Image (spheres, helix red, strand yellow):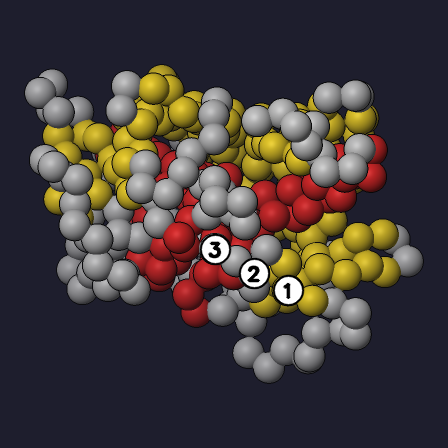
Amino acid sequence: MNLPPMPNGFSPLQTKGFGGFAGPVMGGKDAEGPLFLFDIAPQHLNGDQRLHGGMMMSLMSIVLGEVAQSTAAAKEEGAKARPLSLNCDFVSAGEPGDRVEGRAIITRATRSVLFMSGKLTVGGRVLMTATGVYAIKAADDK
Amino acid sequence: MTEGDSANARPQRVPLASPVEVAPPPGFTSQELHDPFEAHMGPLFEREDANGDRVGAFIADERHLRADGSVHEGMMMTFAYAFLGGAAWRGAGEKPCVTMSLQASFLTDLKRGDVVEVRTKLEKRTRSVIFVSAYFTVGNEPVMTATSLWKVLGAR
């Protein structure tokens, strides 16, 4: 498990609470847009020594959630994005020592809802595809 | 598909410890966890209700929260995955299953200290596919629903 260091410009996301304890998930960007990186470590595995499905969905939820949040905040200062629905398809397994790449795109943004899709890959091999529907909540909406 | 999950836990293995000790909610016992990631996020609890149906639970603590103090959807999906995997394994006649798809709808925000319970329903079993739904509550309030598809290994 000798992965290269994280590229310059990548820093850990959601370091407080769940994101920090389950992760770390690193966020940055490249020519294609926002990019998320995650190195599979021993605590992320299932009993068969592959990436646990719960961790895979957790990673996907952080990738989608980060892009949803930055999109919501760009539309309206202080707005928050909250997941209404996530659908995750398990396409292939992740192995210890893999560096997983995550990407998410906005399919459609209305005033109050974001339709999103996301993908997790390792070196071009797809691990997971997902769609998410997020509510945009104004800063004063409790 | 993700090969090997909680559904494949081999009974002879020694259960893994969780990093924090949490007393089970009344009537629940701690589940034996064999997947490192479930142990990392656990403990997880279970009990049988009056009908003999299994009920799963976890208690939200600081490891499960977003920065604003609400429970992270990743923890909810991890909890769902762990318990639905067990239901699929039992539904398949204790054969190993792998996850094909899991969908969750988040009905409300949750907070630290909430005791989240889950009940599952085996919707359909074909020779090779198991359909499992799940209903999540805090007290009597519905907080999340999930549906899932599992492939029975070795069956076509």
Identify which residue is drawn at 73% across, 21% down: A112
Q: Say above or below: A97 vs A4.
A: above
Asked if labels 1 and 2 touch by Cβ distance under 8 angstroms, the answer is yes
Residue under numbered circle 2:
A15
Mark 2 belongs to which amino acid? Thr
Identify which residue is drawn at 30% across, 64% down: B19
Residue under numbered circle 3:
A17
Mark 3 belongs to which amino acid? Gly
Q: Looking at the picture, tell me which residue is in the foreground, B52 or A122.
A: B52
Would residue A53 be visible to someone looking at this image? no
Of all chains, the one bearing label 2 is A
Q: Say above or below: B105 vs B43.
A: above
User: In x, y percent, where is residue B101?
Assistant: 52, 34
Mark 1 belongs to which amino acid? Pro
Where disc 3 sits, the SS reads loop
Query: Same subunit under labels 2 and 1?
Result: yes
Of all chains, the one bearing label 3 is A
Q: Which mark is residue A12?
A: 1
* Count of labels in the image: 3
User: In x, y percent, where is residue A49?
Assistant: 41, 63
- Which-is-in-front pick, marks 1 and 3? 3
